[in-house]
Amino acid sequence: MPAADRQIWLCADDYGMSPAVSAGIRDLILRRRINATSVMMPSPHLSPDEIEALDTLNSGQKRAALGLHVTLTTPFKPMSESFAPLSHGKFPSLNKMFRTAVARRLDPARLMIEVATQLEAFIEAFGQPPDFVDGHQHVHLLPQVRDAVLKVVAETVPQAWVRQCGRSRGAMRLKDGKDLLLDVLSVGFRRKAKQLGVLTNPAFAGAYDFSDKPGFAKLFPRFLEGLPDGGLVMCHPGFVDAELQQIDPVTHQRERELAFFNSEEFPRMLAQHGIALATPAQT
């Protein structure tokens, strides 16, 4: 097998979504199968014990970069008092948030307050700023939302980088509608980030429709195609529990991803592509 000539970030989204999801992510961090996770501060299942358990994994030598998973869609509730629009006291659906943001009908000040509140909650919980910032369901890429997220990062945690979701040129397929939308949204996002001096990852991969076909082991090599040094692959591993089933449609797919990353096929696949996981910087 060739030696690794690229180092990447493999980030498990949704830490805190449910106890079982968090347990699965911690297991992968402990086994050094992933090197980053982003935390959902508004989740009702992100308990002090879940925070402490994740933080403990980085005691001594740092095993994983920790990020803020900005959350602005249902079924979660705002952490600030002023956020709008709401749906039955919760954030709107992704579709409604998308339409409202594209029409530029969101309140910029209320957006910034909510993003800043989630960021402050992260810093208070972990005792330090996040290494990076991203968004649940890619909401941080939307018009108006991106302005709020990037401005809060630039003014509050300028050392953090922010996830952009544009693919590398070598990985682009015109038939991938979801990926194409992320590519388009990321163009303006990267431009705005550069204007504000906010760092972003050089390329992104990992989006798929969460269907059973093809199997995740067959799908994963596509994410590595053309991924440059420092590129990021998003993933959603975890165990399934009743709490997850009540709030999210992505359930058994998480266990498939978890099983793959825990398998011996996964490190062999990385080695075959000349890829290794980056080592998180000690903070």
Image (cartoon, rainbow, N blue to C red):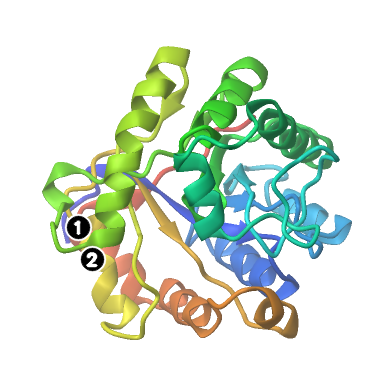
> Which residue is depicted at the point 70% across and 83% down?
241
Query: Dot 1, crowdedness within 10 Å: few (<14), some or many (≥20)?
Result: some
> Nearest the camera: 40 or 32?
40
- Callout 1 secondary element: loop
Alpha-carbon neighbours of circle 2 within 10 Å: few (<14), some, or many (≥20)?
Answer: some
Dot 1 corresponds to which residue?
A: 273
Which residue is at a point 69% across and 47% down the rendered structure image? 85
Taking the image as shown, residue 110 lies to the left or right of residue 98, namely right
- Quick one: 260 or 144, which is closer to the camera? 144
Per the rendering, the mark at residue 140 is none
Q: In this view, does 174 lie above or below 144?
A: below
Residue shown at 51% from the left, 76% from the top: 254
Percent coordinates x, y for residue 20 in the rendering: 69, 75
Q: Is mark 2 on a helix, strand or loop?
A: helix
Q: Do the residues labelled 2 and 1 touch (CB within 8 Å)?
A: yes
Q: Alpha-carbon distance for marks 2 and 1? A: 8 Å
**Where does the C terminus fall, quadrant-wise?**
top right
Which residue in the protein does label 2 denote? 221
Residue type beneath disc 2: Pro
Depth check: 194 or 60 in front? 194
Q: Please name the residue shown 21% across and 43% down the image.
A: 168
